[in-house]
Image (tube, helix red, strand yellow):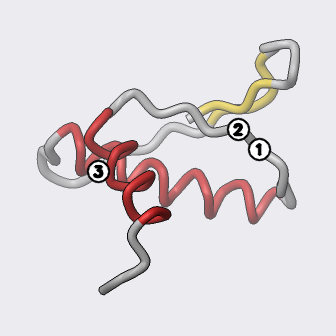
Amino acid sequence: MCIRNSHSHFIKAQPKWYEGVPSPSEAEALDLRDAILWFGNLGLSKVHIELDCKLVVDIIVDSFKNKSE
């Protein structure tokens, strides 16, 4: 995970290691959760998050559209 400013200049990074071999979509979802927690710990509230796993993006977008259980 890395943080860049509005000019795409590198600010800070944090490596992550996971036990076992998660699928790409599981790894992306775990990274997203960890990034959100990291941003909160750094006091960042206005961020743009880039994901490269379409399955995770589709699930997030769908969850905003579908409010049912």
What residue type is disc 1 on?
Val
Give percent across and percent down for residue 34.
51, 57
Amino acid beneath label 2 = His
Q: Marks 2 and 3: which is nearer the front?
A: 2
In the rendered view, does 19 fall on the left or right side of 52? left
Q: Earlier in the sequence, mark 3 or mark 1?
A: 3
Cβ–Cβ below 8 Å for labels 1 and 2?
yes
Q: Residue at x 46, y 33 (%)?
A: 51
Identify the residue at image location x=43%, y=48%: 31
**Image disc number at residue 47:** 1
Question: Which x, y percent locates residue 53?
Answer: 32, 33
Mark 2 sits on what residue? Answer: 48
Instruction: Tell me how far mark 2 sits from mark 3, CA to CA.
Output: 24 Å
User: In terms of secondary structure, where does tag 1 sit?
Assistant: loop
Look at discs 3 and 1 and give the one toward the viewer: 1
Task: Give 60 or 15, whichever is nearer the viewer.
Answer: 60
Residue 52 location, quadrant: top left
Instruction: Answer with left or right where residue 57 lies relative to residue 15.
Output: left
Residue at disc 3, secondary structure: loop
> What crowding class fits label 2: few (fewer than 14 Cα within 10 Å), some (14-19), or many (20 or more)?
few
**Residue depicted at x 82% and y 13%:** 9
Look at the image and tell me in which quarter the N terminus lies: top right
For the image shown, how many numbered marks are present on the structure? 3
- Residue marked by disc 3: 18
Q: Position of residue 17 (x, y in %)?
A: 35, 45
Residue 66 position by quadrant: bottom left
